[in-house]
Image: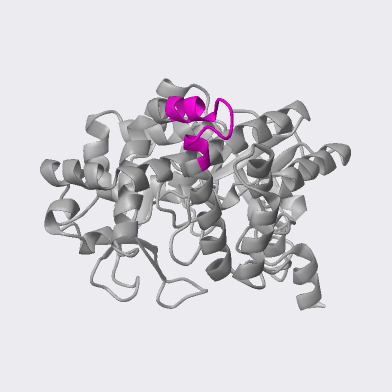
Amino acid sequence: MDFPRASGILLHPTSLPGPWGIGDLGAAAYRFLDFLADAGQRLWQVLPLGPTGYGDSPYQCFSAFAGNPLLVSLDELVKRNLLGHAEVAAAAAAAGDLGIDHIDYGRVIPFKLSLLRASYERMRDGAAIGMADEYEAFCATQAAWLDDYALFMALKDLHDGASWNTWEPDLRARKAAALRKARKDLATPIAIHKYLQFLFFSQWEPLKAYANERGISIIGDAPIFVAYDSADAWANPKLFYLDDEGAPTVVAGVPPDYFSATGQLWGNPLYRWDRMAKDGYAWWIARLRQTLAIVDILRLDHFRGFEAYWAVPAEEKTAINGNWVKGPGTALFASLREALGDLPIIAEDLGLITPEVNALREQFGFPGMKVLQFAFGDGAGNAYLPHNYEPGYVVYSGTHDNNTSVGWFQDIS
């Protein structure tokens, strides 16, 4: 797919300014879009928008389909009569120093979630005219992923955040009777988790619409692998290499290289691509359909893993003793294109890239990536130097793994 030449900024919404300890989808996000448009920029790239797990990384989320409720704007809920400004300010004061130049997740998470949960009861009581009907409609249209996700999160709360593989055997194995009982016993927590998702999407959708009105396209980000402790793995165990107890048998990583003698052991469960192929990659089609409904362009992280991925036995402590396993390659992207049409995908093709990876990317017309901070120190032939760029690439000053350009310059000065 061809993209018009354009420029923009990578900035995750958590980094937007605001008084409540973390950036959100409120007024500051709209001001940022105005700033981009007024500066002649046409792209806003974000990191994965899912609900972050322990470690607070957007690349380890509890769901590949859900949104992060920490991004919900409290001020927007005040406008809808679901919270009071004095109530929010008092809760912030009680939480302690929320910080203005960093995110203290240990303070922000209980502060925000307690207020969001309080707003649920007011929504149910009719404080925001029409919202209860909007919520019910959202639950109905998103049920395919939302029902399992909300149950998963309610069960995590019940088990004090413990990973699903430590739950009671019948819940871990998703026995029908155990799930029915849990849905009955946890009806209110389940409804609240659905409501948190409703809030996220009801705030994100108008923000994206405003971006598009101002000529800004939003670039999203999707990791190739999902977290083990996720609704995705718990609800779809047959799609992953898991044993009878639900534990991974092989996990994701990358082999040793110049930067690491032991490689990188990521620990994500690996897909059973053979089983996914039997239903035409339905889970992946659903995942990308959901993601492309909320962004305009999608960066696929670790694109090389679709051609071949590094599989490491789960008992290993490093990634040394892994091996390369062929990925789905053409079959997956052909199925995605047939189901979804042209795929507005940027392939993150950094690291160990083979001719086969390049061929897969070029076959579907996905632009690759160049990173300017990687360009210096290796002579004029460095592939990341601008005079070596070829058509079909997106150029970054740095990625989410790099320092800012100012910080990078200061470090080398």
**Is residue 325 toward the left or the right of residue 259 in the image?**
left
Whether residue 374 is visible, yes or no, is yes
Viewer-side residue, 121 vs 240: 121
Residue drawn at 51 percent across, 73 percent down: 258
| Magenta residues (range) | 122-138
Q: How many marks?
A: 0
Decide which of 135, 315 is in the foreground and name it: 135
Q: Residue at x 53, y 70 (%)?
A: 106
In this orientation, which residue lies closer to the viewer: 73 or 15? Answer: 73
Residue 239 in sight from this viewpoint: no
Residue 341 vs 42, above or below: the answer is above
On screen, residue 128 above or below 39: above
Residue at 35 percent across and 70 percent down: it is 319
Residue 200: % across, % down? 55, 41
Q: Is residue 282 magenta?
A: no
Name the magenta segment's main secondary structure.
Answer: helix
| Res. 101 image quadrant | bottom right
Q: Residue furthest right?
A: 38
Q: Quadrant of the N terminus?
A: top right
The x and y percentages for residue 317 are 30, 76
For residue 238, side relative to residue 63 (left or right): left
Find residue 34 and report its horizontal and vertical position in percent: 82, 39
Q: Position of residue 305 (x, y in %)?
A: 41, 50
Can residue 126 be found in the magenta stretch? Answer: yes
Vertical position of residue 109 compared to residue 216: above or below = below
Q: Where's the C terminus, which quadrant? A: bottom right
Residue 376: name its quadrant. bottom right
| Color scheme of the displayed model | one colour
